[in-house]
């Protein structure tokens, strides 16, 4: 019998609001000293009341709308009770039966495979828990382990995005994750980083005979901190469960953890040990009415997302699908690119030629500088304003400066923020392409390099390339290499016929 995978993802997305979900403590838990973002509310001391952070509610609505969800008119919070050291309160404020967003969908396009529509069951709001840091050898004494607790993270807004069990392969799961990350970043509501822990994925996996629509026992896999790990964990589970069913056994409903080194999932707890959360309505927070006018206002403020933008870039600037996809991966990069192009007032034809050259600079040299360890790594934080890059691209495109010099100018712009025209003028980098200016330099190169001239005369035409190099050197890279090569060949031919 052939089996097919059935996968549903639960993703916890941390929001980057200024303050926490239910108190006024700063939510910047990572940049602060441990345990300095704490108050009686996030510690749930007796007699204090939580207050809902409206910025977090707005972010939740944004995410819901981006995922084509219905937004509840009336929503409420519930207590989820469980004992764990990272939850001092003994309960987490979450949402149980009436989540803020429900019944949405996302279309995903894996690299090799058809487009698929994945249902989004719900998006609900909750609060993060404290961070436990396990220290192995306290004081260098082995076996003397401690667990440190940082309460800064407790109460930071967390959204849980739950998908329907519509995903049919690890490739679709990967596409779903990447797209959700992209949406969160386009909205600017979170960093969506698996490595930093601001985007945590649990994968529910089962398999069933192809053609059946039953939902069999599923396994929930946790502890994956990279997209790659999610893909491997899902593939491992599909294989393992298929083997179990094929051997006539049953798959057990359980929670398993991914072990990246072993390349396998390991059992964490069985169904019998599953928590009973004893959910009940949070008595300290009244139900929340979400006004329709507010929802529509938020809907109108949503950005153009990557998919639409990619298509538009192909249409409007005549870019290849590859270039359009590259630029729209980050909203900041796409914005920057559009500002570069908008800085020049060009006809349609000229604009698409200019846009192609601009792509080369944005995704080439500028990306290289952003990737270097020193200096900013975000395009919207460089000293180079889009207008300035546009001026450089124009200089280069008009062949006013050479390729090598244009790159030098960009580096100078990167460190000083100066205008390219000023740098070109100051350094005397204007390209020399006039015969009057270049001929004396060409003659000098020929006089100073008799060996190369002899090489040429004995039939080695590659000697011209060496001489072009000499001309470039003498002009500090300003010579037009093509013109220099022509002049050299011409002059050498004259020398040849004079012999
Ligand atoms: P719980 O409340 O126990 O977490 P849910 O019914 O809310 O369970 O489902 C959690 C996740 O598991 C959802 O993403 C859902 O799509 C997925 N899921 C449910 N049943 C299955 C199944 N048989 N196989 C794979 N995934 C499933
Ligand atoms: Mg669950
Ligand atoms: Zn607090």
Image (cartoon, rainbow, N blue to C red):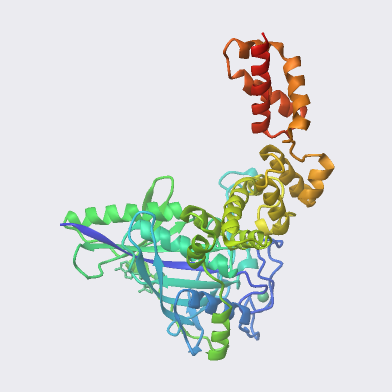
Q: Residue 230: percent from the left, percent from the top?
A: 42, 56
Q: Who's the residue at 71% across and 67% down the image?
A: 36
Instruction: Give 460 or 493, whichever is nearer the viewer.
Output: 493
Instruction: Give 267 or 165, whichever is nearer the viewer.
Output: 165
Q: Who's the residue at 28% across and 52% down the image?
A: 239
171 left or right of 34 in image: left
* Ligand 3 - quadrant of the structure image: bottom right
Q: Who's the residue at 64% across and 74% down the image?
A: 20
Residue 92 visible in the shown view: no
Instruction: Give 174 or 297, whichever is nearer the viewer.
Output: 297
Q: Quadrant of the N terminus?
A: bottom left
Q: Quadrant of the C terminus?
A: top right
210 left or right of 342 in image: left
11 left or right of 348 in image: left
> Hey, which residue is sitting farthest front in the picture?
498
When the figure is inspected, residue 351 is found, relative to residue 262, above or below; the finding is below
318 left or right of 155 in image: left
């Amino acid at each position: 019998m052939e089996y097919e995978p059935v996968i549903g993802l639960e993703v916890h997305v941390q929001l980057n609001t200024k303050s926490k979900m239910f108190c006024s403590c700063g939510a910047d838990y990572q940049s602060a000293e441990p345990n300095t973002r704490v108050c009686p509310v996030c510690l749930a001391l007796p007699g204090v009341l939580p207050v809902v952070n409206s910025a977090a509610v707005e972010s939740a609505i944004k995410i819901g709308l981006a995922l084509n969800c219905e937004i509840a008119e009336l929503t409420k919070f519930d207590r989820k009770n469980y004992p764990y050291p990272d939850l001092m309160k003994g309960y987490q404020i979450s949402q149980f039966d009436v989540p803020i967003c429900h019944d949405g969908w996302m279309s995903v396009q894996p690299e090799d495979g058809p487009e698929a529509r994945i249902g989004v069951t719900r998006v609900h709001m909750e609060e993060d828990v404290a961070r436990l840091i396990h220290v192995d050898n306290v004081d260098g004494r082995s076996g003397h382990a401690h667990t440190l607790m940082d309460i800064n993270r407790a109460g930071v807004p967390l959204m849980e995005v739950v998908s329907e069990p519509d995903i049919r392969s690890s490739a679709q799961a990967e596409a779903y994750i990447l797209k959700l990350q992209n949406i969160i970043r386009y909205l600017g509501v979170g960093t969506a980083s698996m490595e930093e822990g601001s985007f945590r994925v649990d994968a529910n996996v089962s398999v069933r005979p192809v053609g059946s629509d039953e939902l069999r026992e599923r396994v929930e896999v946790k502890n994956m901190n990279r997209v790659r790990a999610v893909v491997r964990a899902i593939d491992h589970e599909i294989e393992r469960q298929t083997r179990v069913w094929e051997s006539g056994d049953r798959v057990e409903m359980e929670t398993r953890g991914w072990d990246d080194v072993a390349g396998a999932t390991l059992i964490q707890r069985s169904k019998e040990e599953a928590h009973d959360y004893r959910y009940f309505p949070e008595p300290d927070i009244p139900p929340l009415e979400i006004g329709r006018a507010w929802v529509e206002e938020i809907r109108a403020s949503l950005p153009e997302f990557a998919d639409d933008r990619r298509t538009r870039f192909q249409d409007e600037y005549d870019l290849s699908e590859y270039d359009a996809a590259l630029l729209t991966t980050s909203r900041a990069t796409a914005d920057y690119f559009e500002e570069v192009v908008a800085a020049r007032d060009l006809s349609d034809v000229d604009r698409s030629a200019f846009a192609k050259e601009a792509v080369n600079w944005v995704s080439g040299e500028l990306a290289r500088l952003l990737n270097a360890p020193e200096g900013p790594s975000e395009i919207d934080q460089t000293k180079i304003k889009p207008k300035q890059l546009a001026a450089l691209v124009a200089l280069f495109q008009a062949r006013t400066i050479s390729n090598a010099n244009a790159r030098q100018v960009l580096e100078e712009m990167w460190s000083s923020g100066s205008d390219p025209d000023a740098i070109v003028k100051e350094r005397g980098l204007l390209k020399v392409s006039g015969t009057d200016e270049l001929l004396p330099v060409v003659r000098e190169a020929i006089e100073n390099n008799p060996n190369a001239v002899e090489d040429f005369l004995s039939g080695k035409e590659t000697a011209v390339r060496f001489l072009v190099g000499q001309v470039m050197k003498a002009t500090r890279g300003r010579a037009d290499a093509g013109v220099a090569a022509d002049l050299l060949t011409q002059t050498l031919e004259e020398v040849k016929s004079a012999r």
